[in-house]
Image: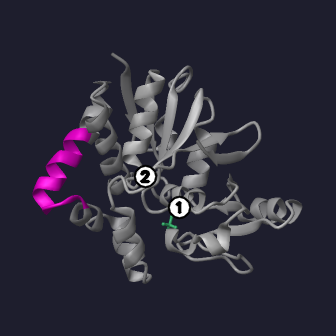
Amino acid sequence: MPRIDAVALPDYLVDDQLRGRIAVVIDVLRATTTIVEALGHGARCVVPVASVDGARVMAHDRDGALLCGERGGVKPEGFSLGNSPLEYTGDVVGGLDCVLTTTNGTRALHLATQADEVLAGAITNVDAVCDWIRADGRDVVLVCSGTDGRVSFEDCLGAGLIVDRLGFVASDSAAMMFHAMEGAIERFGGLRYAVESSFHAKRLIELGFEDDVAFACQIGTSSVVPMFDSGVGEILAD
Ligand code: 3SL
């Protein structure tokens, strides 16, 4: 039986923890949910970039690329799109490269590249990601992105869903995420209410992004499995 491990922040990864394994990077609010939507609506690829300046240069160098992302949750000046999954419709992103920089999610993707494969996981594609991992058979490490160096409850809830569905042999931290998810769904009366109780969800709701929070809580609505090829620097739909 394969094993499943988890870290609540990418900074908690220890030497070789990812080597020979599949990493699933999770940023429920909102980077990985947005990546799933961009690819699901026909973007050719998503190019994750850690810095705003780096993203500007990258988008400039790629013909017709869209410059996308956020800082403090909002679209930086001169960007075409923010980090709302609802913006990534087919008529906007179809056939295009989306150069995306976000505060935590795109950084986490780059910090996970020691793994054999790097997938982007969200609540919306949880079933597709689990099917992919089951078919592959290697051990998995769930890498929660967190928010500004702090653990994010909603990422741990997303990780708990994956632990639950896969039923692999769980490390203590993976088991903790499973139990947190199960207990929170019971305590709050549903996954969406649990996600809405998180610090980051409240901040997004204050900024007017309540529809994004609701959107990100839909379980398994997408069949897209985003795979990050760090050699090429692109995330493509599997
Ligand atoms: O930090 C990130 O990667 C973002 O997803 C944060 S936000 O939801 O856009 O505020």
**Amino acid type, label 1:** Glu
Height in image: 225 above or below 27?
above
Where's residue 34, x and y in %?
A: 53, 62
Residue 114: x and y in percent read: 62, 29
Point out the frontmost of discs 1 and 2.
Answer: 1
Residue 213 placement, left or right of 21: left
Tell me the kind of residue under disc 2: Ala
Residue in view at x 36 percent, y 52 percent: 220
Q: Which mark is residue 37?
A: 1
SS for callout 2: loop
Residue 160, image x and y in percent?
A: 29, 43
Label for residue 12?
none
Q: Is residue 182 rendered magenta in the image? A: yes
Q: Which residues are magenta?
A: 178-191
224 vs 186, nearest the viewer: 224
Locate the N terminus by quadrant.
Answer: top left
In the image, is 107 to the left or to the right of 98? left
Residue 125 appears anywhere in the view: yes
Any mark on residue 122, and which?
2
* Looking at the image, residue 204 lies above or below residue 116: below
Q: Circle 1 — which element?
A: helix
Mark 1: give few (<14), some (14-19) or many (20+) Cα within 10 Å.
many
Quadrant location of the C terminus in the rendered image: top right
> Which residue is depicted at the point 40% across and 55% down?
124
At x 53% / y 27%, what residue is drawn?
18
Give how far across and how far down residue 223 sits, in percent.
46, 49
Q: CA distance from mark 1 to mark 2?
A: 10 Å
Asked if residue 70 shows in the view, the reply is no
Residue 202 to residue 194: above or below: below
Is residue 238 shown left or right of residue 57?
Answer: left
